[in-house]
Image (cartoon, grey):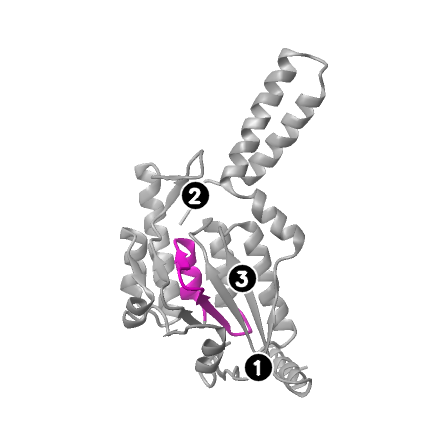
Amino acid sequence: PLPIAFRDKAERAMKKADASEAGGQEVRVLSLKGLINPVTERYVVREITRGEREGAECVVLEIDTPGGLVDSMMNIVTKMLNSKVPVVSYVHPTGAKAGSAGTFVVMAAHVAAMAPGTSIGAAHPVVLGPEGGVQSLPKEIRQKEVNFLSAYVRAVAKRRGRNVKWAEKAVRSSATLTDDEALKAGVIDLVARDLSELLERIDGRKVVLDGEEVVLHTKGAVVRRIPMSPWERFLLVISNPMVAYLLLMVAFYGIIYELANPGAIFPGVIGVIALILALSLIHISEP
């Protein structure tokens, strides 16, 4: 039998050849908008895996996020660093941002790009407050979290050949950059106005997969946008911290009413359901 690594590369080559014969290479475009959480994590990881399995030329991840959960961000980054299909991060459209956890995701891509008028950075750890706002972590926990995330982002930046010093600065002091500044600082690879320009400019670029250089062929590629499923979009809406705390309020009053009026049943059932949903949606920290 062939060695596993060699067999995987041969299978990818065959899938790309089949795609080419079917009418051109396929570029898959995902949308990472809003908070990075278990819902967006599942969506991104699943579609990168499908891109690997089906021989996509590359996966483009359009990003507009204020940040998100540490665990979800790390799972996405891990998938990107070990992906067998090139992943392109693209902060888009104009006015979009890759804040906090989004900074890590951008830097983990094989190719990182931003649209004009976008920004990246501010990755200092915070806690989601009871009204959807943010507040500082306790001093001891904050220091541990900052040290860990600083080391983590340095490792990601070094792996992709990006600006290690700035990456650490984004975590330790919430440094931010505009698209032009990020390009000059070596945080991203290029600035592109839209997806068409992005695909044209990365055509012929070399990226490393499994220790081997691969050339991107994206000019004239078939673009396939893959949205979240309706169920994932629903989960994304209710996973908003504000929704979670509203559910806590419903749970509190429902249970109090049930205790004050034994046998009412309905308020108690609603309260318990709301409590279970709220506890499943509340998370502690985000980068």
Q: Distance between the residues labelled 3 and 1?
A: 18 Å
Which kind of residue does numbered mark 1 sit on? Ala
Q: Is residue 2 visible?
A: no
Residue 153, x across and y down, in percent:
37, 59
Residue drawn where x is 45% and y is 40% of the image? 284
**Mark linked to residue 148:** none
Whether residue 178 can be seen here: yes
> Mark 2 — residue?
285
N-terminal of the pair, mark 2 or mark 3, is 3
* Residues rendered magenta in the picture: 83-109
- Residue 81 relative to residue 53: left or right: left
The residue singled out by tag 3 in the image is 31
Gap in angstroms between the C-alphas marked 1 and 2:
39 Å
Q: How crowded is mark 3: few (under 14 residues within 10 Å), some or many (20 or more)?
A: some
Q: Which amino acid does label 2 sit on?
A: Ser
The amino acid type of the residue labelled 3 equals Ser
- Left or right of 166? Residue 85 is right
Residue beneath disc 1: 221
**SS for tag 1?**
loop
